[in-house]
Structure formats: C-alpha cells, structure tokens
Image (cartoon, helix red, strand yellow):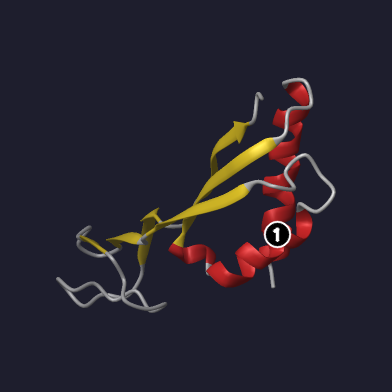
Amino acid sequence: MHEFSIVENILERALAIAVEHGHLPVSRVRVAIGALQQVEPEVLEFAFQAAVQGTLAEDAAFEWRAVPARIACAACDAQFEPEDLFWVCPECAAAGGRVLAGDELVLESVVLDET
C-alpha cells in the first residue's frame, strides 16, 4: 500500500508549512491525485487519520480531488481518457501514448488555524 508513503510525504510538507508560520495548527489539507497513481481513497483517508495523531495536523480535515487520466495517442495524437490500464486510442485503435494528465500528486493547499 503506497498510500501510507504518499500521506507521509504530504503530511511532512503540511507540517513544515505549519512550523514556518509559527507552529499554527493545520485545519485542512487538500491534494489532487491523478488516476494513474492508483490510490485507494479509503486507504488514503485511513492513512492520513493515523499519521496525524499527535501532530499539529491532528484535527485537520483531509480533502482530495481526483484528476482523470488523459492520454495523447502515440500514432494519431488524438486525446482520450482511457477506460482501463490498456491505452487503446478510440480514433485509430493504436495502443499506447503519452500522459497529458492523471499522473500528478499535488499538495494544493494547507489551511492553518490562526485562532
């Protein structure tokens, strides 16, 4: 389960931001996760809740946004969203292509509680 290592990296950065701003508590963490990361949302949420215990993010809400995969066909350059792990162009039936979107893992925002 790579979700735990993903959460570890996200939390590390969120806590660094909290420390940079005077050790303020984290109230929300938001990430964008590409479909090609093959992350299980329930496991990611569980990993986050386990990892934040005893930290400045202990009471933080965790929000994530799924980014669909978008592929450019290797043969005809048509853009499409694959329905599974096999990338077959709906225009020319060629296999493969290059990733345009869906492989990202981005920490979009960290909200700190100033009260």
Name the image quarter holding the C terminus.
top right
From the viewer's perspective, is 29 left or right of 103?
Answer: right
Q: Amino acid at mark 1?
A: Gln
Residue 55: tell me if it is visible.
yes
Q: Which residue is mark 1?
A: 49
From the viewer's perspective, is 5 left or right of 44?
Answer: right
Name the image quarter holding the N terminus.
bottom right
Horizontal and vertical percent position of residue 18: 72, 30
Indicate the quadrant where residue 83 lies. Answer: bottom left
Name of the residue lying farthest toward the left: 91
Indicate the quadrant where residue 39 lies. Answer: bottom right
Q: Is residue 29 above or below residue 80?
A: above
Q: Is residue 6 above or below residue 36?
A: above
Indicate the quadrant where residue 79 lies. Answer: bottom left
Residue displayed at 46% across by 58% down: 34
Please state which of residues 59 and 21 is positioned toward the viewer in this rendering. Answer: 59
Residue displayed at 28% across by 66% down: 81
Horizontal and vertical percent position of residue 21: 72, 21
Residue displayed at 75% across by 32% down: 16
Residue 39: tell me if it is visible.
no
